[in-house]
Amino acid sequence: MIADARAAYAEYTKRQPAAPVPALPSRAPSGKRLVVITCSIPVCVTLSEGAEEAARKLGWTVTTLQSNSTPQGFVSVMDQVAADPPDALAYISAVPDSSIRSQLAKLQAAGTKITSISPLGDALTPNGPVEAVVFGQKDAALTGTLMGQAVVAEANGPAKSVFVWDPSFVGSWGPIKDAYKKVLEGAGGSADILEVSNANIGKTVPSQIVSHLQANPDTEYVALAVVDYTAGLDAALRSAGLAGKVKILSRAADAASLKAIQSGTQWASIGLELGAAGYRAVDQLIRLMMDVPLGDRADAPGWQQIYINSNVTQTSENPEPPDYAQTYYAAWHVG
């Protein structure tokens, strides 16, 4: 397990190339109407902006709706979309698909092509209304594995850590937590679980992490389910006299986390597709419209990279797969 962690750490701290995108048989269709349902945390905004950019390049009309990440808000937004079905829908889940079954059925009957982003444990089914996913179970499991392997490799063996997450996202984040814990325990270490609420990002989350560390002073690593949990964390650690005493590992690296890694206030972060994930969702929808088989592209791990001090080369932009936009444009024949 430790040898595997070292090998993965060595591989994923290298610059990771963008995955190839198969060319469409002809130019992607224009004049379509896309609805994107996003959530309130910054990483969701970046993702939805990627989908908007990709769709507008195709000449599509885009409407982005904010669900406020509450079940009631999400269902209300889905009611709104189902009342006026678009050509395509990409939505970041806030409830299981079982809670919006009637809305999805109405959209499917109207011919809307649908992809789900970070689905809440909802598997794709033959002839179901949702025909593709981004950040599905395979992607989440890879992220959790890489997070665990990074800790084990850096510790060079067993390590004591805590994984911080919002359990209401168990469907999409559960595989991250489970894979992380499996790697840590497989190497003889441990992974405590700290439950927080995404509604308290930048509010009580930092103090909750500090309280856990004070109660468990032998903790060496703090693994964050999403980079947004770093909001206010460094200041809270410094105030508690804990700065530099634990190593912070986050998921979905952004420009701020790269800067923190470079300055030494954060140890590492897993880079994911952010804007590029929006492009991937649009690519899936195009292929569904054109009856191009998705194959593994219906649910596949996306681009990922482990960022540490030695491989951070810029801190002004969010990390993304190299030249991803041009890769998609070429595949879509839009130049």
Image: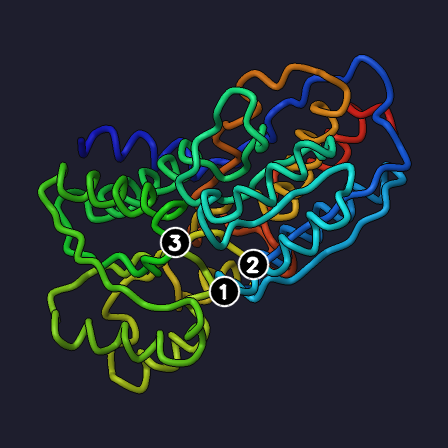
Marks 2/3: CA–CA distance: 14 Å
Label pair 1/2, CB-CB below 8 angstroms = yes
Quadrant for residue 334, please give it.
top right
| Number of numbered tags placed on the structure image | 3
Amino acid marked by disc 3: Phe
> Which mark is on residue 20?
none
Camera-side residue of 133 and 5: 133
- First along the sequence among labels 2 and 3: 2
- First along the sequence among labels 3 and 1: 1
Which dot, 2 or 3, sits closer to the camera?
Answer: 2
Q: Is residue 263 left or right of residue 148?
A: right
Residue holding disc 2:
74
Camera-side residue of 8 and 117: 117
- SS assignment at label 2: helix
What residue lies at 78% left-to-right and 37% top-to-bottom? 87
Residue holding disc 3:
169
* Position of 179 relative to 299 (above/below): below
Classed neighbour count for the residue bearing mark 1: other residues with Cα under 10 Å, few (<14), some (14–19), many (≥20): some
What residue lies at 69% left-to-right and 39% top-to-bottom? 279
Amino acid marked by disc 2: Phe
What residue lies at 56% left-to-right and 21% top-to-bottom? 127
Marks 1/2: CA–CA distance: 6 Å
- The image position of residue 23, as x and y in percent, is 75, 17
Quadrant for residue 188, please give it.
top left
- SS assignment at label 3: helix
Q: Is residue 198 left or right of residue 100?
A: left
